[in-house]
Image: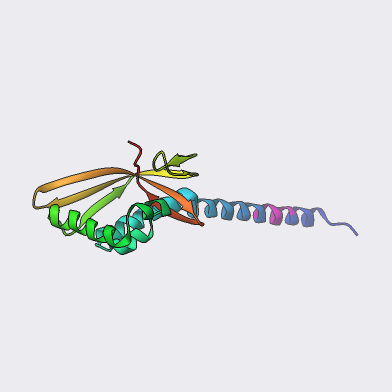
Amino acid sequence: MGYTRNQKNTYLKIILVTLAIVLLLLLLKALLFSSEKQAKEAVGQFYAFEQKGEFSSSWELFHSSMKQRFSKGHYIQDRAHVFMNHFGVDTFTFTLGEPEKLNSWRMSKKDSVVKPAYKITIIQTFKGKYGNFDIEQDVYVGQEKGKWTILWDYNK
């Protein structure tokens, strides 16, 4: 027993609608969980911790190469000293640029290549005892053990 023309059209419509839903879900997943978005979120989280003076938490988001440069205690003490004492500020605001994907990048000539990596420009705005000023810095993000981590550039 065969299908009627109406039944065939109904099945075809169901298949097409199902396919469209699946494609839409895949596209939505790609947009919501893209590497680019996750990298930008990591940088945003890092500077949100810095903004609140939670330098211990921001240090935890560093790539292992960065953690080798700064012990946790030294980083916490140094960041608080420089920003709070020298600049005379309690906090800052920040803006993030759009991520730029790099096929490979290294923090310095002696460090290992990180791939893929993203470069994100951040602008920190301070209002302190010496007036208002901005610091613009390119921040790099690379994956390490499945987690996006923060790196700074020491190549210059």
Please tell me which residue lies in front, 62 or 32: 62
Find residue 2 and report its image quarter: bottom right
Q: Is residue 87 above or below residue 49?
A: above
Please tell me which residue lies in front, 1 or 79: 79
Residue 51 location (% of width, % of height) = 25, 58
As for residue 13 lying within the magenta part, the answer is yes
Q: Is residue 23 left or right of residue 38?
A: right
The boundaries of the magenta stretch are 12-17
Q: Quadrant of the C terminus?
A: top left
Quick one: which residue is furthest to the right in this view? 1
Q: Is residue 98 visible?
A: no
Residue 108 location (% of width, % of height) = 39, 41
As for residue 90 lying within the magenta part, the answer is no
Please tell me which residue lies in front, 13 or 127: 127
Q: Please name the predominant secondary structure of the magenta segment in the image.
A: helix
Quick one: which residue is furthest to the top in this view? 156
Q: Residue at x 27, y 59 (%)?
A: 74
Residue 127 location (% of width, % of height) = 14, 52
Q: Residue at x 58, y 53 (%)?
A: 26
Find residue 25 and report its image quarter: bottom right
Q: Residue at x 47, y 44 (%)?
A: 112
Q: Quadrant of the N terminus?
A: bottom right
Q: Is residue 64 visible?
A: yes
Please tell me which residue lies in front, 136 or 56: 56
Residue 131 location (% of width, % of height) = 10, 48
Q: Is residue 154 left or right of residue 35?
A: left
Colour scheme of the rendered structure: rainbow
Q: How many marks?
A: 0
